[in-house]
Image (spheres, rainbow, N blue to C red):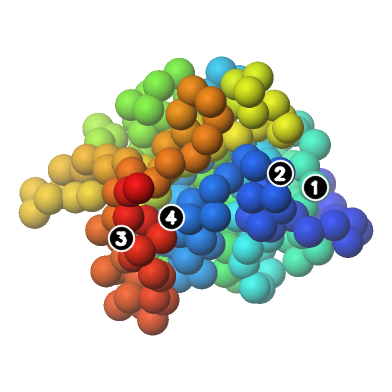
Amino acid sequence: AVITRSRSKRSTGLDGLVQEHALSPPAAELLAACMQVRLPILVAGFGGAHTAVLLAALMGSTPGPSAYVRGLPTPTLLPRHCIALDAGGAMAATVRLALASSTPWLALDEPDTLALEEAAWAATTGVGLAVGIRAESLLHGLERARTAGIAHTQPAIPYALVALWEHPPETNARTAFSLRQLLEIQRDDAGQATTHEVVTRNRRGEFLVTAVPFLLDTLRTHGVHLDAAKFSPR
């Protein structure tokens, strides 16, 4: 593993993506809240979109040390408190190396099967987890990322949010990548998972809030109170 540390003073948090019109303020606030209480987040990159941009921003929203394990050599500007580990062909071992440092937050960019198994174990111990997966569709991304209630193999990861990330339409071409949809994952008593859209982007590149997240109740139990009015469809 090759360990590097970013020396840039540029902000790499979610606020920067809001300023670049890649995220809406409600989406950024909900993502940051989930990272704060360490609820797992899945970033599904469509059409070859690099998930590294949003993963780095998620790590930038955390207050403490974090680790970023990448399975692909994608250049990524990381916050100063985030250590990058290039896995090469040994991603699971690199994830174990990151977890051995007792990092509270971990990002995985294009993990393999064994690395996801390590991540699933880490999620049960309270590690804040963000996983980036290239996907052809929402279902493909959920299956590849081993989502609890959807994946057919164990162990699975109980993601709270799914961010669909892609190249934006030309009408919103001020940034290289942008959010298409933000969805929360709900589970019934049998553990079966369903998705619930919270934020979407229309054909003109405008972000629209589509529903109040049920996740707000979960966040309140962790002491994080978000204004439900920000998520009321207009």
Q: Which residue is mark 4?
A: 40
Q: In the rendered structure, which disc, 4 or 2, sits on the residue that comes first in sequence? A: 2
Q: Secondary structure at mark 3?
A: helix
Amino acid, disc 4: Pro
Residue 98 versus residue 73 in the image, above or below: below
Name the residue carrying label 1. Answer: 77
Q: Amino acid at mark 2?
A: Glu
Q: What's the residue at 68%, 69% (across, down)? A: 65
Frontmost of labels 2 and 1 is 2
Counting residues from the start of the chain, the first of labels 1 and 3 encountered is 1
Q: Residue reaching furthest left?
A: 189
Proximity of marks 2 and 1: CB atoms separated by less than 8 Å: no
Badge 2 marks a residue whose secondary structure is loop
Instruction: Indicate the secondary structure of the residue bearing disc 4.
Output: loop
Residue 211 visible, this orientation = yes
Mark seen at residue 20: 2
Crowd band around label 1 with a 10 angstrom C-alpha radius: few (<14), some (14–19), many (20+): some
Residue at image point 36% right, 38% down: 146
Graded by Cα atoms within 10 Å as few (under 14), some (14 to 19) or many (20 or more), the crowding at tag 2 reads some
Q: Nearer the viewer, mark 1 or mark 3?
A: 3
| Disc 1 secondary structure class | loop
Which is in the foreground here, disc 2 or disc 3?
2
Label 2 vs label 1: CA separation? 15 Å
As measured in the structure, the alpha-carbon distance from the residue carrying label 1 to the one carrying label 3 is: 30 Å
Q: Are marks 2 and 3 in contact (CB under 8 Å)?
A: no
Q: Which residue position holds label 3?
A: 215
Residue 120 placement, left or right of 11? left
